[in-house]
Image: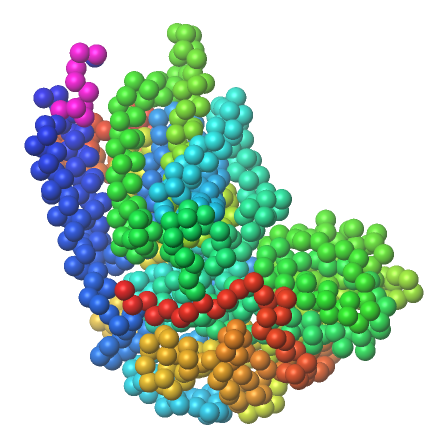
């Protein structure tokens, strides 16, 4: 064995040279075939093509899959309406509107979909596929702030527009804000500001709150927001406990509450986590308890109808806030509920609403800018004021790309009339009460940076 | 000239050409975009490294994702603190993962078989949970570690690269490593990694590892202390995983704790088994196949299927669409599961066994890939 040559030492210098020349030629060849080899003026410019591609990146599996499925339905409806099919939905009520019902800038809207799996890695892989392979000029979706922040960062680096779906963390338009990213949905601070006065009226000034919080950026910022606004009305905070996302069983976190001095539980949970933690809290008898002469109360700051459906009777009488609810009676909401219901047979969730609106707002901004070029679309969206989209007069603030509008405070209905009629609107908190300066301490530490159009 | 040497070089050359030419031959499969090809290369490295441990020694680690995650975090911190150049990032990710593998291996290798697997799984799951809780200042929890405009980046500052209004991109001396340059960077490292794995397999050290697989007790009786060999195999394979994790951060500067989850550890086991345990090419093929399913099959939706089956008469097309939609889109796991079952039942040696059988069928029993597979007991049983 030892007197044999080892397998790899048998090449002459000439062989090596030949091989390396061959590999260089092969390595170089693909450079001529890549999409951006010629100097495009911006990434994924549809040019003279008759259609334009949008990317819908939503969770189709995991704790937020229900929301994701509803988001996808809303996007498909928005594409129909943009292409002039169906009854047009909110396109008829949106003001001002540059939409013509013939696609965007006369190009038919096509779309690609992907599963974020509610994981940053998977979401970014899926968004990259849409940008690199399918040529999407805009990515939208997401039902978790962790994912939204990750994908927003990716879109900024790549040079396409990101229209955030359901993301409620202060960070999305706070410390992680990006020039190419826009959020229509409200945020944790707004929930806190809207809930504070309502809670004061309902439960008084002297309460002791115990927080269970989903352990990621959304949970942290919502907890901070609610703590700030409840302490503002005189409440004290007993403890704040972080729980893992998708925990399933929350009993180990609920037992200590029974032995604590707290008389209010704040559940900073969303999706299936909220359904599980609320159901278990009720099963453990928290709501039948009375501490310091006060009835024990539970608060779910971020509510959705899908969650209420999952938690059943347990949501009765529980306060929370929401971005939009299908029972609103303005023209925009009615038009949207009607066309969504006609197509899918059930009313849309707030996730579906925000995604539908984001798709229309993007299309409208492109029409106004007269181009898909991201930086001009950003300019068209910044400071844009609109109405007729279900939330009353709304503004996309230029400094942080956050929409400012009224916030709904809701309560679980005691006597629901149908399986969808689970929440009643307690108060429509006016925009002025939930507004904050863009450099507010909960939102500081980030910068939009400059917009990126991906031109090589 | 030595026969096996020739075929080794032939294999290495074929591999190099195939990897570098990916953008051309992947076009018909719709997989010729940079992100997916980067993934092919990165997970190829991960699987090659895993195979050094599992394929050669037979020790099945269920915790390799921990090294993948550690590598990603190390690379990200190198970006944040030192420089956006990817060379230090890659080196750090290998070193950190190596140290981490040494510590975990030192403890886990006191046991073998299922106990070893469970120990590694436990350590990986511990790392995952630590990343979510105690280590939050290092890992940034669920949100994941990301670059910031305000990061110090000492070396970049010292070199006079000023912070701008937009986030810097990872680069190799000024060339950004995203997109196609990122793919070529990963591809070159994959080729180097493959070469090293080839040398290890052919070396006396590799022979020792294979001997451990075939009969560890006899090795001990003949006077060999097998544990240092095992530990080195474990560390090397952990370094490969760290390298893969570092490369993930090279092509996309973000690190999340989900990279350490047990599903990620399980994925590399699947890749290796699907491709062929103990073969050199197999793990790379398995990695590519799984990543292809994850990225391409999951993206098909109903409207695309309708286009595919548009040539059929209306009723039939609808049936085909509704049947096939059960296997694509969000159900891609189902398809992958079926493929995995078929491979394990009919080709216990993985895809590479299929390749060998085909080679034999066409009468080229000594196909170039043949001598590479180490003795594969499972495969030969099925053949017999």
**Is residue A6 found inside the magenta-colored segment of the image?**
yes
What span is in magenta?
A2-10
Left or right relative to A43: residue A437: right
Q: Residue at x 84, y 73 (%)?
A: A204
The answer to which image quadrant residue A132 occupies is bottom left
Residue B347 in view:
no
Left or right relative to B201: residue B89: right
**Is residue A69 found inside the magenta-colored segment of the image?**
no
Left or right relative to B243: residue B123: right
Q: Residue at x 21, y 12 (%)?
A: A2
The answer to which image quadrant residue A234 occupies is bottom right
Q: Position of residue A269 (x, y in %)?
A: 65, 62
Q: Position of residue A80 (x, y in %)?
A: 39, 82
Q: Position of residue B200 (x, y in %)?
A: 30, 26
Q: Residue at x 37, y 82 (%)?
A: A366
Q: Is A186 situated above or below A57?
A: below
């Amino acid at each position: 064995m030892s007197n044999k040559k080892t397998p790899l030492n048998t090449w002459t210098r000439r062989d090596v040279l030949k091989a390396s020349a061959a590999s260089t030629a092969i390595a170089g060849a693909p450079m001529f075939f890549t999409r951006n080899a010629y100097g495009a003026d911006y990434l994924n410019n549809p040019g003279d093509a008759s259609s334009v591609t949008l990317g819908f990146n939503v969770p189709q599996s995991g704790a937020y899959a229900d929301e994701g499925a509803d988001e996808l339905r809303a996007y498909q409806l928005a594409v129909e309406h943009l292409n002039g099919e169906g009854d047009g939905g909110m396109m008829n009520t949106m003001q001002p509107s540059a939409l013509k019902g013939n696609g965007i800038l006369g190009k038919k809207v096509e779309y690609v979909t992907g599963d974020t799996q509610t994981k940053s890695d998977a979401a970014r892989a899926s968004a990259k596929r849409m940008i690199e392979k399918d040529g999407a000029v805009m990515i939208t979706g997401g039902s978790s702030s962790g994912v939204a922040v990750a994908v927003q960062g990716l879109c900024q680096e790549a040079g396409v527009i990101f229209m955030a779906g359901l993301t409620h963390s202060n960070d999305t338009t706070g410390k992680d804000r990006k020039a190419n990213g826009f959020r229509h949905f409200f945020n944790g601070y707004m929930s806190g500001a809207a809930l504070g006065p309502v809670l004061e009226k309902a439960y008084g000034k002297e309460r002791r709150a115990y927080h269970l919080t989903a352990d990621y950026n959304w949970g942290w910022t919502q907890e901070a927001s609610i703590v700030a606004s409840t302490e503002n009305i005189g409440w004290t905070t007993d403890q704040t406990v972080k729980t893992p996302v998708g925990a399933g069983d929350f009993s180990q976190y609920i037992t200590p509450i029974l032995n604590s001095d707290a008389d209010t539980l704040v559940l900073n949970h969303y999706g299936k986590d909220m359904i599980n933690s609320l159901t278990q809290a009720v099963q453990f008898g928290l709501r039948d308890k009375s501490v310091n002469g006060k009835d024990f109360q539970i608060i779910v700051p971020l509510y959705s109808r899908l969650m209420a459906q999952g938690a059943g009777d347990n949501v009765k009488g529980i306060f929370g806030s929401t971005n939009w609810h299908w029972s609103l009676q303005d023209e925009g909401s009615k038009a949207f509920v009607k066309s969504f219901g006609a197509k899918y047979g059930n009313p849309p969730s707030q996730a579906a609403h925000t995604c539908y609106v984001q798709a229309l707002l993007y299309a409208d901004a492109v029409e106004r800018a007269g181009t898909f070029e991201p930086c001009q679309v950003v300019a068209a969206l910044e400071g844009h004021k609109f109405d007729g989209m279900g939330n009353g007069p709304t503004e996309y603030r230029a400094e942080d790309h956050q929409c400012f509008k009224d916030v709904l405070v809701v309560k679980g209905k005691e006597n629901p009339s149908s399986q969808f009629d689970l929440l009643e609107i307690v108060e429509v908190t006016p925009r002025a009460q939930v507004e904050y300066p863009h450099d507010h301490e909960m939102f500081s530490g980030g910068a939009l940076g400059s917009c990126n159009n991906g031109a090589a | 000239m030595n026969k096996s040497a020739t075929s080794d070089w032939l294999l290495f050359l074929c591999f190099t050409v195939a990897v570098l030419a990916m953008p051309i031959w992947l076009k018909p499969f719709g997989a010729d975009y940079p992100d997916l090809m980067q993934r092919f290369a990165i997970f190829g490295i991960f699987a090659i490294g895993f195979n050094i441990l599992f394929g050669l020694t037979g020790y099945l680690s269920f915790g390799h994702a921990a090294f993948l995650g550690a590598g990603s975090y190390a690379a990200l911190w190198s970006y944040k603190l030192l420089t956006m150049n990817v060379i230090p990032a890659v080196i750090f990710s290998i070193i950190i993962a190596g140290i981490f593998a040494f510590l975990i291996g030192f403890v886990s290798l006191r046991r073998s078989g299922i106990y070893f697997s469970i120990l590694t799984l436990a350590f990986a799951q511990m790392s995952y949970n630590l990343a979510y809780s105690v280590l939050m200042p290092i890992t940034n929890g669920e949100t994941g570690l990301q670059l910031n405009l305000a990061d110090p980046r000492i070396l970049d500052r010292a070199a006079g690269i000023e912070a701008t209004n937009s986030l810097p991109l990872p680069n190799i001396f000024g060339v950004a490593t995203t997109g196609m340059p990122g793919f070529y960077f990963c591809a070159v490292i994959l080729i180097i990694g493959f070469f090293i794995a080839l040398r290890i397999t052919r070396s006396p050290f590799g022979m020792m590892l294979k001997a451990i697989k075939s009969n560890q007790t006899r090795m001990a009786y003949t006077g060999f202390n097998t544990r240092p060999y095992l530990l080195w195999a474990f560390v090397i394979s952990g370094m490969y995983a760290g390298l893969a994790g570092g490369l993930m951060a090279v092509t996309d500067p973000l690190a999340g704790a989900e990279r350490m989850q047990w599903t990620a550890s399980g994925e590399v086991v699947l890749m290796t088994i699907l491709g062929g345990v103990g073969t050199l090419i197999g793990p790379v093929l398995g990695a590519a196949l799984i990543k292809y399913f994850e990225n391409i099959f999951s993206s098909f939706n109903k409207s695309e299927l309708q286009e595919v089956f548009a040539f059929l008469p209306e009723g039939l097309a609808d049936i085909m669409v509704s049947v096939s939609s059960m296997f694509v889109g969000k159900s891609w796991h189902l398809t992958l599961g079926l493929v995995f079952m078929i491979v394990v039942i009919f080709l216990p040696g993985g895809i590479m066994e299929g390749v060998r059988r085909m080679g034999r069928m066409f009468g080229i029993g000594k196909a170039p890939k043949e001598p590479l597979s180490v003795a594969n007991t499972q495969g030969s049983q099925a053949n017999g």
